[in-house]
Amino acid sequence: MLESRNLTKKYVSVTAVNDVSMTLEDGQIYAMLGPNGSGKTTWMKMAAGLVKPTAGSVLLNGEPINIASRSKIAYMSTEPYFYNWMSAKDAGRYYADFFADFSFEKYASTLKDMDLDINGKIRSFSSGMTAKLKIALTLARDAQVYMLDEPFNGIDLLARDEIRTSILSAAKNDKILLMSSHLVEEMEAIATSAVFIRKGNLIEFVSLNDLREKQGVSMADKYREIFGHAEVSA
């Protein structure tokens, strides 16, 4: 279980995350939804132990995030983090050096499924290829929590199918999977619950079954209701 309690992050006069409390449970796939600048990335970085909260706390299995618990969280950022000289194989070795739970065999298999050359130089990869590489690296870890920040950015429609398959294969009863995105329909095909966040505030946290059965709306409908004229991408 991953829990944030009154989690807040302020940067001078800007409040990126404002008093957010929520609990993510094992065996679930969560879609964190909201326009750019809504606080999704900041919340994830605090949950991963990469950014210190201004107030509040994050707990994994009831314990505050620390060095030991951080090793159980696999976070994929939107920022590039590869050296210019690296091949895909080098990136895998780099991850294997840092993370004891990293499976190079699983990584290589995922690259093959995604039609990526393990010997290819990353600097020659397109943005979509690099996005797939980052996902393969993250999902090759045997973590308890996977957090993917905008996993479908720069990915064409056919490649999204490959990524969706990889993500679903990582979703198990003892795992928590959280993805942030503004690609609402894409998230609806994967997620079991939705977290709507706007201007740092948690607006609604709801299971997709409740949305459909009790409220009679889709996740995309709910997004439009909450964010008004914000763009909903297919």
Image (tube, rainbow, N blue to C red):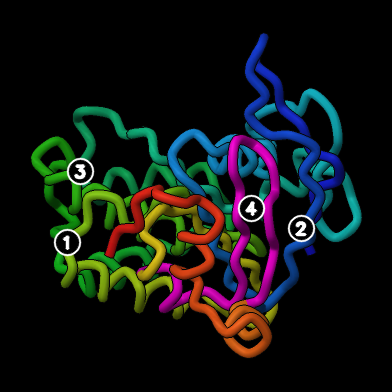
Q: Is 93 on the left or on the right of 175, as rendered?
A: left
Q: Which mark is residue 73?
A: 4
The residue shown at (68%, 52%) is 203
Q: Earlier in the sequence, mark 1 or mark 4?
A: 4
Q: Is residue 23 above or below residue 122?
A: below
List x then y, in percent, for residue 132. 27, 57
Looking at the rendered structure, the secondary structure element under dot 4 is strand
Q: Is residue 221 above or below residue 117?
A: below
Looking at the rendered structure, the secondary structure element under dot 3 is loop
List x then y, in percent, for residue 185. 37, 70
For disc 2, the marked residue is 2
For disc 1, the marked residue is 156
Q: Is residue 223 above or below residue 124?
A: below
List x then y, in percent, for residue 195. 62, 59
Q: Earlier in the sequence, mark 2 or mark 3?
A: 2
The amino acid type, in three-letter code, at marker 4 is Ile
| Residue span colored magenta | 186-207
Q: CA distance from mark 1 to mark 4?
A: 27 Å
